[in-house]
Amino acid sequence: MDIQNLLDDIVGSIKPRLGQGEVANYIPQLGAVDAGQFGISVATGDGEVYASGDAAVPFSIQSISKVFALALVLAGDGDGIWRRVFREPSGNPFNSLVQLEHEDGIPRNPFINAGALVVTDKLLSITGDASGAVLDLLRQESGNSAIGVDAVVAESEARNSNRNASLAHFLASCGNLENPVQDVLDNYILQCSLEMSCTDLALASRFLANNGVRVDGTALLSSPQTKRINAVMLTCGTYDAAGEFAYRVGLPGKSGVGGGIIAVVPNNCTVCVWSPGLGKSGNSVAGVAALDEFTTRTGLSIF
């Protein structure tokens, strides 16, 4: 199969969907992004890269960062995190306070905001610099040392973080944070404000398709740990639309409200798409459609 021609075809076929959905304007800086952009990149296990559209344009990765934070926690502390975070789909908005209170401060999964705050807290305990550890991993795996924080997005998020602060304080009140609330929030905001392109993210995600093996040949994760991250991505990685994503795309995936989505084809490749217009669950409208077309035309689905 000619992957490059396929990606170019997808860019053409997806154009009618560009501008659909709503940009994440509850973070003002994200709301200023042009919704008419779309990029797609594929990185194979052996390092081949195919890209089309706006695949080289950096964007705010937001919740996609949660995958890499979780990987580092599993690498540094094994399965201990699962005593503090469940592994079940939430069925509720990603920033729900009601569900967290109902379940006594144990977040439903590591990819909703409450769960990601607990993961960031643990990574902060392990490394002393959670956001720095995520940044280092992304730079090393992508090969792009220029990746960094979008300071304007970080400032915008910090000014509009009351809901996340409420989640963090409730977690602390239940004894489910080890570090000061503000330290956890600061690290969480910085990791979410990292700016990367589709190609950067496709490359950085390859260890998830390679049984946990990093670009330098060392193991970040064991094969069972990699399987489990991919399983949680499939069931929980696209907020409360995980069932629809599995139905349409059929791959483990993780989205972010910046409009990006990474998807993993185990033992084969990783795919990253980006388009800022979001559906009601916070997933890129054009991005999901593009991944649907990619897996339908290639047959590259875990199903």
Image (tube, rainbow, N blue to C red):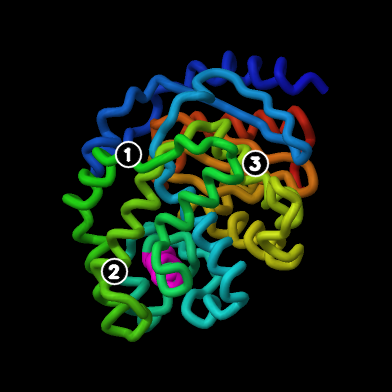
- Measured in 3D between alpha carbons, the distance from the residue under mark 1 to the one under mark 2, in whole angstroms, is 24 Å
297 w.r.t. 80: above or below = above
Q: Residue at x 52, y 74 (%)?
A: 86
Residue type at the position of mark 3: Val
Question: Where is mark 1, residue-wise?
Answer: 150
Residue neighbourhood size for the residue with mark 1, other residues' Cα within 10 Å, grouped as few (<14), some (14–19), many (≥20): some
- Measured in 3D between alpha carbons, the distance from the residue under mark 3 to the one under mark 1, in whole angstroms, is 30 Å
Compared across the picture, whether 277 is left or right of 38 comes to left
Q: Residue at x 40, y 41 (%)?
A: 148
Residue 35: % across, % down: 36, 25
Q: Which mark is residue 167?
A: 2
Would you identify the image quadrant in which residue 98 lies?
bottom left
- Give the foreground label among 1 and 2: 1
Would you identify the image quadrant in which residue 47 lies?
top right
Q: Secondary structure at mark 1?
A: loop
Q: Earlier in the sequence, mark 1 or mark 2?
A: 1
- Is residue 116 rendered magenta in the image? yes
Residue type at the position of mark 2: Leu
Q: Residue at x 36, y 80 (%)?
A: 178
Residue neighbourhood size for the residue with mark 3, other residues' Cα within 10 Å, grouped as few (<14), some (14–19), many (≥20): many
Residue neighbourhood size for the residue with mark 2, other residues' Cα within 10 Å, grouped as few (<14), some (14–19), many (≥20): many
Front one among 20 and 180: 180
Front one among 19 and 165: 165
Magenta stretch, residue numbers: 114-123
Q: Which mark is residue 249?
A: 3
72 w.r.t. 298: above or below = below
- Is residue 100 rendered magenta in the image? no
- Measured in 3D between alpha carbons, the distance from the residue under mark 2 to the one under mark 3, in whole angstroms, is 31 Å
Q: Secondary structure at mark 2?
A: helix
Residue 51: % across, % down: 62, 23
Residue type at the position of mark 1: Asp
